[in-house]
Image (cartoon, rainbow, N blue to C red):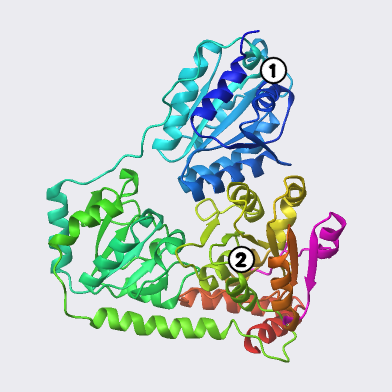
Amino acid sequence: MSKSTAALLVDTLERAGVKRIYGVVGDSLNGITDALRATGEIEWVHMRHEESAGFAAGAEAHLTGELAVCAGSCGPGNLHLINGLFDCHRSGVPVLAIAAHIPSTEIGIDYFQATHPEKLFEECSHYVELVSSPAQLLQVLTRAIRVAVAKRGVAVVVIPGDVALRPAVGKAPQWVLPAAPVLRPADTEVTRLATLLNDASRVTLLCGAGCAGAHAQVIEVAGRLKAPIVHALRGKEHIEHENPYDVGMTGFVGFASGYEAMKSCDTLLMLGTDFPYRPFYPENARVVQIDVRPEALGNRCPLELGVLGGVRETLEMLLPALKDKTDTRHLDAALADYRQSRKDLDALAESGPDSGVIHPQYLTRLVSELASDDAIFTCDVGTPVVWAARYLKLNGRRRLVGSFNHGSMANAMLQAIGAQSAFPRRQVISLSGDGGFTMMMGEFNTLVQQGLPVKVVVLNNGTLGFVEIEMKANGFLPTGVDLKNPNFALMAEAMGIRGIRVEKPQDLKAALAAAFSHDGPALVDVVSARQELVLPPKTTLGEVFHFGMFTMKAVLDGRGRELIDLARTNLRR
């Protein structure tokens, strides 16, 4: 019996080193899932929603740097993939999506579940193509794999179910993937960059995800330039640890010290970041940028110089030409600001012996203290991102994954599934908001079904917290943010997962320790303060005015108790 096109697809993925495929089965995928069953080499990770499959694959790709794969059946299955794939694509991680399609004879005549996947995925992929016949498969599939890996993003192969079942044409190729390229700038560009930096008196570094693998080079450059190092959120895991020049993060969830270090410089050196928030850039400084993505250079502000190259490779070329500066006043001031900012933030992460409120800062600090040295953290969009950014301590071995570019709700547990699947022996902790956890709560079953010992910490504050804060900061009365939550711990126990509910701060440390040491999945339901303020690093007069408008409206609307609770939560620790 001849091999099917689906079997050839699976063989080729094996040659590419694929270990697992995340997805939901369906009739148009039957040929592929049966081929996976027959060979047994690639694991099928049974998800409850295709969106989750995209997020899980993205987390695996983020952590390993290698190709990860997800799949969806025709019509709605493909549509469900889209949000997860948008996150993968915007995060720049290599993911291949297999989008099964309706029977090839029915395309274009309004068949049951008909869509046009090759159009649907255009905006969230570097490459998407329809396989119309078995003779096309190898060319389309191998190109998709190479594009996903080389361009660091999503590629999609659309294949009708009947085409997957036809006899294969050709055999799996010996070579599938290219080695990662090394991108170095021209010598003349490096010379120009060195001249700019040597002539500057107050240099600040802004470091992003592109600094992965360049920690030593970044630290050495900062030492030569006597430059404080500010990081964007996605740069935290790569640059924050063992860094004597660290002055914290900037952006809406950052530190006052990071904000000030950028605003007070005369030259900003951007390394591997396309930091999006324009109000945080310095107004009167020269900006120079190093990135492997030409589209990122000058994307947010005018540049004095943009250098196309890898951060590590470019800094290695740059270092011999840099002068060792002696004036440390800019660095000293930034470090002093950071010490004060860190002290102020850490003061909020304490809990007194008589406190009756669990503050999320205290929760996240304990999570950081009790987690393994090589733990993988995922965090939901919203307030969990803020507390993770400010209170998780990363050490070069720990990792942090989130929907930091796409900003999708409900990402943390889904990404934790991908992380735990790829690293079954490492501790994986999902810092979930109650809104995000309940949005995709079906995947909680996946932890049991797949035997994944993920630890889910739910920040149960009964509201879509970040949205509520945004409404208040803009002068609106919060509307539609209340969450009527169940006892998540009892729910977990009913599903065969260790569940612990914590309502008093005095019980929190023991509960987290018990959950983290549990041999299997566990959930900690932390009933926490609802109205915990998330203050940006710099408060504007406009924000003060709008927050004042909210307080006035709250009184006029008979909601004065909210103001009392707000004051108690944030003024009495």
For the residue pair 377 and 407, the one nearer the viewer reads as: 377
Q: Residue at x 58, y 47 (%)?
A: 422
Q: Residue at x 34, y 44 (%)?
A: 295
Q: Which mark is residue 110?
A: 1
Question: Foreground mark, 1 or 2?
Answer: 2
Q: Is residue 170 above or below residue 216?
A: above
Q: Secondary structure at mark 1?
A: loop
* Quadrant in the rendering for residue 322: bottom left
Q: x, y (%) of residue 249?
A: 43, 69
User: Where residue 130 sits: x, y (%)?
Assistant: 54, 20
Q: Is residue 326 visible?
A: yes
Q: Dot 2 surroundings within 10 Å: few (below 14), some, or many (20 or more)?
A: many
Q: Nearer the viewer, residue 30 or 72?
A: 30
Instruction: Say which residue label 2 marks.
Output: 384
Q: What amino acid is found at the position of numbered circle 2 in the picture?
A: Pro
Q: Looking at the image, is 562 positioned above or below residue 8?
A: below
Tell me if residue 285 can be seen.
Answer: no
What kind of element bears circle 2?
A: helix
Q: Is residue 503 magenta?
A: yes
Left or right placement of residue 113 versus residue 221 in this view? right
What residue sits 13% from the left and 55% below the top?
A: 192
Whether residue 336 appears in magenta in the rendering, the answer is no
**In this rendering, is residue 193 above or below 126?**
below
Quadrant containing the C terminus is bottom right
In the displayed structure image, the side of residue 240 where residue 113 appears, left or right = right
Q: Which residues are magenta?
A: 476-505
Residue 59 in the figure: left or right of residue 283 = right
Name the amino acid, label 1.
Answer: Asp
